Image: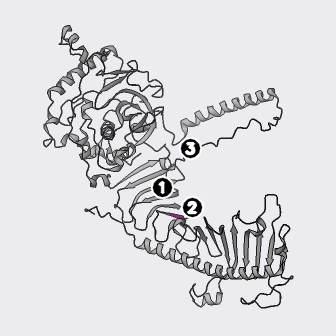
């Protein structure tokens, strides 16, 4: 449901038509002949199908002149990339025009204005929407048709409050195909009594029928459920039909011009079709629509299903469009030329300027209400922060309690394009396009203050260390890597509390860093090394001065090899000194080679580990400084938001 717009204030009879060209005000000789043929077709149709509703063939245009509906279509390809695709055309039409309901919900309108006039005043009914959209689709090369039919109350009135927002729909899960193996062992199922299964099924059926009766009783009194529409099946609606073949369209589908959404031809919202037309011909549906559109055939060459007004072959139509004034001899002589060449459209060329295309919302923004959700849209550059779309998800149908807010941005120099806000936890997640100076991809936080819980994802291909994700709070930091030559994939750091005396004295965090308690590193398997020489986990307990190595397992192993270096009790810690003895070295190496038992080998290994521990400390401080820099930059970007403008956009 779009928010109510007071369209009744607009008077179509007061529009100025004096400037319109002569093709709008008069009919050419070919158009007059076309109207005569259409009248004759209409008379034959009424005579053969008296129970059917009148056809929508030649309504009045804005100048009060009868025009055949096919000539009101003006195929046009607009010079914008998105308008080459059906989704772009449909999105533009539903955003640019304001919906007006039909004066009578059960009869088609008496007039059909040109697409140029509809674009000028940015409003129209479903037929105006469909004609404009179909003109753009045919111009883009699609096999598109306008449809005059019947639909549900919700579709005709643009009420989407019972529908799930398209942005919240989850993609269908593709079931994993199991590899059939006819040689696998099939274990016998547990034996069950057939009589007990029958009794259980019978009991479930009785329970289900009782629940169904309760549901039917509740529907009558339940608040928020849609009431039965007394005009169900009679409400007139117009939409667009796309047939497969051109532009690689795989299958037939409908487009609702009010929403721009595509629908299957079996959608229960579409209740029947009277006729369809394009810029070349007109077809009347001769199929039964008591089950809606799901059983309809859209083979327009089938004369049993579709009665065509102007035959494209030598086969005569069941409803002949030959003029009754011509005698039999004239008809026989012209029988080989039964097809009628449709006159060119009387509508002038459809034009949309760049300004109109980029600013489609006549009221500044568009608001659409869905089931427990609200979608707001703005034109680009309408908001100073680049906001173009906002989706608010609610917990209740009345939309009072917010659960989540998603915002989309365009043209921001900081490359932010989406923001998600969890209203329950106040967690904010920013998403960035590639190209940010800090290689930012995703940033999750509750506050831009440091050490309050930040998760940052990077475009790791632009970094030299392969870091793709980092999480930091006041007590820990976790880093995740990918594609490193040393096979490192995770690093976890634990911090202690800062010195309270220095903190109370007002000394900054830089001068009073958090003490590093422990550093853990995890490595993937290096196939070039033996498993008992390939470290899987490395732990540096900095405060306790303990280093622990855990090696990978071979396929047949169950217990990993380990080496632990401990500080010698009673000696002060000195970084330039290593004391190694059998008392401060704990080894559990059931599969290790002999060299691991050599004290000299362990002594050299400990020297290497001490040097790497020192480098790791510097890395941790650099990581802390990088996080502070990220927060400072993001705070500055949010305080001074700048939008980028193309150098080719002279107006901006």
Q: Is residue 362 above or below residue 620?
A: above
| Tag 2 residue | 424
Is residue 425 found inside the magenta-colored segment of the image?
A: yes
Q: With 550 as the anchor, is 362 left or right in this view?
A: left
Q: Is residue 309 above or below residue 604?
A: above
Q: Tell me which residue sits at (82%, 35%) in the image.
A: 188
Mark 1 and mark 2: span between their CA atoms? 13 Å
Q: With 105 as the anchor, is 506 left or right in this view?
A: right
Mark 3 and mark 2: span between their CA atoms? 28 Å
Question: Where is residue 218 shown, x and y percent of the image?
Answer: 58, 37
Q: CB under 8 Å between callouts 1 and 2?
A: no
State which region is magenta. Answer: 424-430
Q: Residues within 10 Å of mark 2 (few under 14, many from 20)?
A: few
Q: Residues within 10 Å of mark 3 (few under 14, many from 20)?
A: few
Is residue 493 found inside the magenta-colored segment of the image?
A: no
Say whether disc 3 or disc 1 marks the residue closer to the N-terminus. Answer: 3
Mark 3 and mark 1: span between their CA atoms? 23 Å
Q: Assign a secondary structure to mark 2.
A: loop
Question: Where is residue 528 shown, x and y percent of the image?
Answer: 71, 64
Q: Is residue 344 visible?
A: yes
| Tag 1 residue | 392
């Amino acid at each position: 449901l779009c928010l109510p717009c007071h369209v009744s204030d607009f008077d179509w009879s007061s529009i100025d038509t004096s400037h319109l060209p002569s093709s709008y005000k008069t009919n050419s000789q070919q158009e007059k002949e076309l109207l005569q043929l259409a009248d004759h077709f209409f008379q034959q149709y009424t005579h053969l199908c008296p129970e059917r509703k009148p056809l929508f063939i030649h309504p009045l245009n804005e100048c009060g002149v009868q025009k055949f509906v096919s000539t009101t279509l003006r195929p046009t390809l607009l010079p914008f990339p998105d308008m080459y695709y059906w989704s772009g055309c449909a999105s533009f039409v539903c955003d640019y025009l304001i919906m007006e309901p039909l004066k009578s919900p059960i009869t088609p309108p008496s007039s059909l204005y040109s697409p140029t006039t509809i674009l000028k005043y940015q409003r129209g009914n479903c037929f105006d929407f469909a004609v404009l959209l179909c003109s753009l689709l045919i111009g883009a090369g699609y096999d598109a048709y306008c449809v005059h039919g019947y639909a549900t109350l919700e579709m005709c009135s643009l009420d989407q409050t019972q529908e799930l927002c398209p942005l919240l729909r989850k993609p269908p899960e593709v079931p994993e195909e199991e590899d059939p193996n006819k040689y696998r062992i099939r274990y016998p199922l547990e034996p069950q009594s057939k009589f007990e299964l029958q009794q259980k099924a019978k009991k479930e059926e009785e329970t289900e029928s009782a629940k169904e009766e309760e549901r039917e009783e509740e529907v009558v009194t339940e608040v928020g459920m849609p009431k039965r529409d007394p005009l169900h099946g009679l409400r007139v609606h117009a939409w667009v039909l796309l047939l497969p073949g051109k532009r690689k369209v795989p299958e037939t589908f409908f487009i609702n011009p009010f929403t721009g959404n595509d629908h299957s031809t079996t959608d229960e919202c579409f209740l029947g079709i009277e006729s369809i037309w394009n810029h070349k011909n007109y077809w009347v549906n001769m199929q039964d629509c008591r089950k809606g559109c799901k059983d309809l055939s859209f083979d327009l060459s089938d004369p049993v299903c579709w009665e065509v007004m102007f035959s494209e072959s030598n086969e005569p139509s069941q409803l002949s469009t030959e003029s009754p004034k011509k005698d039999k001899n004239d008809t026989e002589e012209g029988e080989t030329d039964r097809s009628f060449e449709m006159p060119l459209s009387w509508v002038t060329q459809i034009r949309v300027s760049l300004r109109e295309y980029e600013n489609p919302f006549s009221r500044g923004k568009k608001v659409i209400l869905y089931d427990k959700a609200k979608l707001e849209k703005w034109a680009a550059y309408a908001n100073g922060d680049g906001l173009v779309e906002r989706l608010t998800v609610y917990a209740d149908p009345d939309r009072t309690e917010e659960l989540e807010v998603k915002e989309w941005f365009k043209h921001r120099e900081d490359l932010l394009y989406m923001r998600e806000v969890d209203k329950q936890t106040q967690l904010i997640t920013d998403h960035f396009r590639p190209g940010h100076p800090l290689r930012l991809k995703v940033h999750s936080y509750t506050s831009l203050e440091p050490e309050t819980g930040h998760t940052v994802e990077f475009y790791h291909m632009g970094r030299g260390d392969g870091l793709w994700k980092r999480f930091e709070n006041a007590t820990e930091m976790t880093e995740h890597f990918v594609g490193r030559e040393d096979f490192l994939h995770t690093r976890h750091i634990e911090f202690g509390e800062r010195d309270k005396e220095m903190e109370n004295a007002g000394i900054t965090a830089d001068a009073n860093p958090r003490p590093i308690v422990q550093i853990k590193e995890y490595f993937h398997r290096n196939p070039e090394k033996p498993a008992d020489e390939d470290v899987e986990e490395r732990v540096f307990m900095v405060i306790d001065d303990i280093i622990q190595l855990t090696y990978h397992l071979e396929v047949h192993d169950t217990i990993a090899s380990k080496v632990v270096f401990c500080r010698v009790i009673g000696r002060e810690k000195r970084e330039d000194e290593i004391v190694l003895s059998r008392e401060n070295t704990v080894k559990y190496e059931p599969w290790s080679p002999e060299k691991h038992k050599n004290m000299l080998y362990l002594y050299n290994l400990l020297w290497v580990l001490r040097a790497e521990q020192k480098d790791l400390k510097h890395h941790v401080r650099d990581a802390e400084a990088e996080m502070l820099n990220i927060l400072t930059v993001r705070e500055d970007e949010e305080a001074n938001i700048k939008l980028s403008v193309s150098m080719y956009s002279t107006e901006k």
